[in-house]
Amino acid sequence: MAAPEEQDLTQEQTEKLLQFQKRKKKCAISNAMDGPEDDLTHTDSDSADSNDTIGVEEIDMSGTNSDEEESSDETEAEYSDMLHNIVLDLTGIESMDQCRHTLEQHNWNIEAAVQDRLNEQEGVPSVFNPPPSRPLQVNTADHRIYSYVVSRPQPRALNDAKRELRFLLVYLHGDDHQDSDEFCRNTLCAPEVISLINTRMLFWACSTNKPEGYRVSQALRENTYPFLAMIMLKDRRMTVVGRLEGLIQPDDLINQLTFIIDANQTYLVSERLEREERNQTQVLRQQQDEAYLASLRADQEKERKKREERERKRRKEEEVKQQKLAEERRRQNLQEEKERKLECLPPEPSPDDPESVKIIFKLPNDSRVERRFHFSQSLTVIHDFLFSLKESPEKFQIEANFPRRVLPCVPSEEWPNPPTLQEAGLSHTEVLFVQDLTDE
């Protein structure tokens, strides 16, 4: 994993560091603030259920609560004042004890201490490998852990408490305070306190030396440590309804927390009722919207079917209209074709012509038509003559009776060129029958 980038110092901050380094060569400062680290790991061996224990693991207690000894050395006093001013300007730390503690962690390398402090305020991991420390962790009943190791844990805890309508107990741990160790060991880890926290509230804890804890400390403005704050949703805002500061015994802590919970429980009950009413109203509105949408979809479906029915009728009417127009055009074309065939017929031979043939046609409507033709004329002439008649069908064939046969009056594969009347074996007087083929 790539190392995080350092925060760049301003020119003014760099100049102050250079001035300090020059003065540092002229004075030797002994590390009088060193102290042993206390291992505050607590194990409740008497508890039957390991999930009911709260472990406060390795809280960094390397700082000291002793007051700074007054130095008679004028150079050391001047250095101390300059040190406090430089750290105040560069990092915003106002506590001399915290300033010394930060320098001790970085072996009195002020540049590394300042840079690491700036990175810490920005939420960036240390680039100077500070001593490792495990986070302060508290297991709640639902096994959620709120500590500074979780990304933006404090807003998450607030959101959970607001969403679930539960009390949120916030503990700010002062690493340098003399009562922090006793409070964690004897009060916070007491089985009855653990049981109360796990059953009736959410819990979030953090050291004020960590960026998240420092930001919460700036918001809550505690006066001393140990510090506990009870937060809940009140009047639709996350509000601090109780503050406990200073060392407190387990029984007193339980009584105080119980009193705060009982005094403010009505607000949560009221908020639950309001939220349930809002939910019911929302469900009712959703049901009304769904019913409206269902009715709207039903109306739209009816309208769609009506449109489709109108369109179907329109298309049918249009189709009938087109059929009528087509039928009218067809009849017109048929009439024009009949007239053209009639105009193209050769003149009828005279009765005295020995090459003439008298043919009597029996039409499908039982009417008779008589006309003379010439022996040398093609059977096509007979077909054209019948076709030109108004009462003749559109499609027909001509049959002879003796012998019974169909005359090839139109070109076909068998007769590409229809024969003449003489070739067809017609006599001077013939009776031919016209058979209607229109429906076939």
Image (cartoon, rainbow, N blue to C red):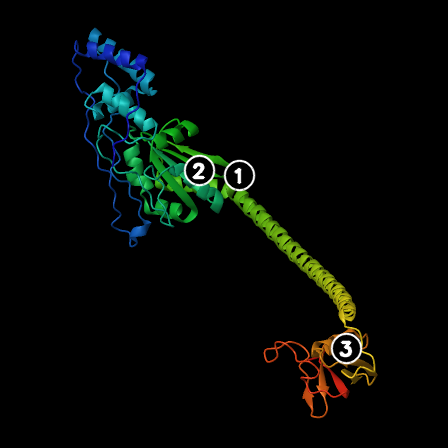
Residue 157 drawn above or below residue 314: above
In this orientation, does residue 322 appear?
yes
Would you say residue 72 is visible in this rendering?
no
Residue 368 in percent (x, y) is at: 83, 84
Q: Quadrant of residue 218?
A: top left
Q: Is residue 237 above or below residue 66?
A: below
Q: Give the percent coordinates (x, y) of residue 318.
A: 73, 62
Residue drawn at x 47%, y 46% is 164
What whole-number distance in Å separates the C-alpha atoms at marks 1 and 2? Answer: 12 Å
Residue under label 1, please give it: 234
Mark 1 touches mark 3? (CB < 8 Å): no
Q: Earlier along the polypeptide chain: callout 1 or callout 3?
A: 1
Q: Residue at x 57, y 45 (%)?
A: 270
Q: CA distance from mark 2 to mark 3?
A: 115 Å
Q: Nearer the viewer, mark 1 or mark 2?
A: 1
| CB within 8 Å, label 2 to label 3 | no
Question: Residue 421, how many percent across, how many down?
Answer: 71, 82
Q: How busy is the neighbourhood of tag 3: few (under 14 within 10 Å), some, or many (20 plus)?
A: many
Q: Earlier in the sequence, mark 2 or mark 3?
A: 2
Q: From mark 1 to mark 3, how far is it between C-alphas?
A: 107 Å
Label 3 sits on what residue type? Answer: Leu
Please give the count of numbered marks on the rendered protein. 3
Q: Which residue is mark 3?
A: 386
The label number, if any, that marks residue 230 in the structure image: 2
Residue 42: image location, x then y, percent: 25, 43
**Residue mark closest to the camera, 1 vs 3:** 3
In which quadrant of the rendered image does the C terminus lie? bottom right
In the figure, is residue 240 to the left or right of 91? right
- Looking at numbered disc 2 in the image, what kind of residue is underneath it? Met
Residue at 28% x, 28% y is 5
The foreground one among 324 and 141 is 324
Q: Which residue type carries mark 1?
A: Lys
